[in-house]
Image (cartoon, helix red, strand yellow):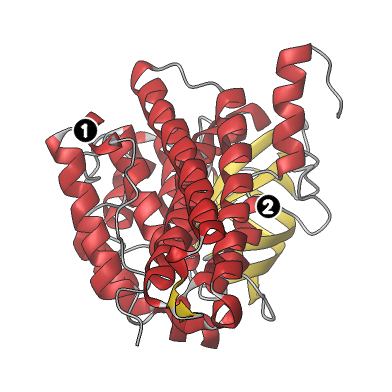
Amino acid sequence: MYENIGRSLGTDYFRIGDQLTPTEREIWRRTRDFVDHEVLPVINGYWERAEFPVPLVAGLAELGVVGDGIDGYGCPALSPIATGLVHMEINRGDGSLGTFLGVQAGLAMRSIALLGSEAQKQRWLPPMAKLAAIGAFALTEPLHGSDSVALQTRAHRDGDTWVLNGQKKWIGNGTIADVVVVWARDDADGKVKGFLVEKGTPGYHARRIDGKGSLRAVWQAEIELTDLRVPESDRLPGAHTFKDTGRVLAATRNTVAWAALGHATAAYDVAAAYCRQREQFGKPLVAFQIVQQRLVRMLAEICGMQLYCLRLGRLIEEGNLSDTIAALAKMHNTGKARQVIMDARDLLGGNGILLDFHVMRHLADMEAIHTYEGTETIQTLIVGRDITGVGAFA
């Protein structure tokens, strides 16, 4: 009955595309086509069943866009803006698939690329770029979400090995990963260090978290580490303190801002198509002034999000992206995306809660994205400390 619901209708009102290189536009087109033709026709079923979409991961591998702009090691050559466009489009299709990509490339691969030894990079990055090896990033703990620096997971040096004990929670890919980047505090010096834990290592126990109302098609885990032994050769040599962990997290906040833009764009596309086709009181919804006003406001917010993202990409190219700018962009875009998606759900009336129209899935998924990689409150306080010189939290 309703045609093109969920498909990309075009929201580039400020002609951001004119600022892109031909290569960036081609990557954008390929990823958009993958979402429209491969993801959208099937994703609702995976989401409703809370089933990991293995065939879509295989398609993502064939697309050749996994790597977040890491230089070499079999990773595709992606500019910062091309990287952002990939995350935007994948999340326009589905937040679970987008989260899988964010964990794989943005957290696990980037940890190895930034902090790993040459041998670790050679071993893991090429297969991870092809999705022949899956990665996870184990930082968050059951009692420490926003206060992530207060790690209780411990690492004890015993000759040429490290013994790890502790718990982790909300670890994307944690039950299926071939390699998990585990963060733990060294008993000897109290510093946070990173370790590569391979699949099948004794002492690693992961349980899938069920009952989620958000990001249902990506599997996240609670992990128990019990006297788990990691050889010194699998410690990340570039990870000396939590500041090094923070370098990885700061880089991913950029892609979370792009991801939020993807969710908002999806919801706007659905609302605009629906309101053109849905008739009430003898005319299409778009003929009503209040509907036009709401669609224009939604588009205005999306344009602002696009400009944030474009500037993020340029700052990365210049080597000038700071942690605080990334925090502000993440805070802004996730907050705006939530409102745009809520407006879209409202414009669809009762149909807005049906998975067939996609908006409810994006609304639920946006709740998790608004929280992870630092809540709005934490991002606000990071920027607040920067502009006032006063830290309002430890």
Question: Which amino acid, mark 1?
Answer: Asp
In percent of width and height, residue 263 lies at 48, 57
Question: Looking at the rendered structure, which numbered label has been put on residue 18?
Answer: 1
How packed mark 1 is, by other alpha carbons closer than 10 Å (few <14, some 14-19, many 20 or more), is: few
Question: Which amino acid, mark 2?
Answer: Thr
Is 253 displayed left or right of 241 in the figure?
left
Residue at left 51%, top 75%?
Answer: 217
- Local secondary structure at mark 1: helix
Residue at left 56%, top 76%?
Answer: 352
Counting the numbered discs, the total is 2
Quadrant containing the N terminus is: bottom left
Is 103 displayed left or right of 186 in the figure?
left
- Above or below 244: residue 90: below
- Whether residue 216 appears in this view of the structure is yes
In percent of width and height, residue 20 lies at 22, 33
Q: Which residue is mark 2?
A: 371
Lower position in the chain sequence, tag 1 or tag 2: 1
- Above or below 124: residue 131: below
- Whether residue 52 appears in this view of the structure is no
In percent of width and height, residue 382 lies at 72, 27
Along the line of sight, the residue nearer the viewer: 241 or 370? 370
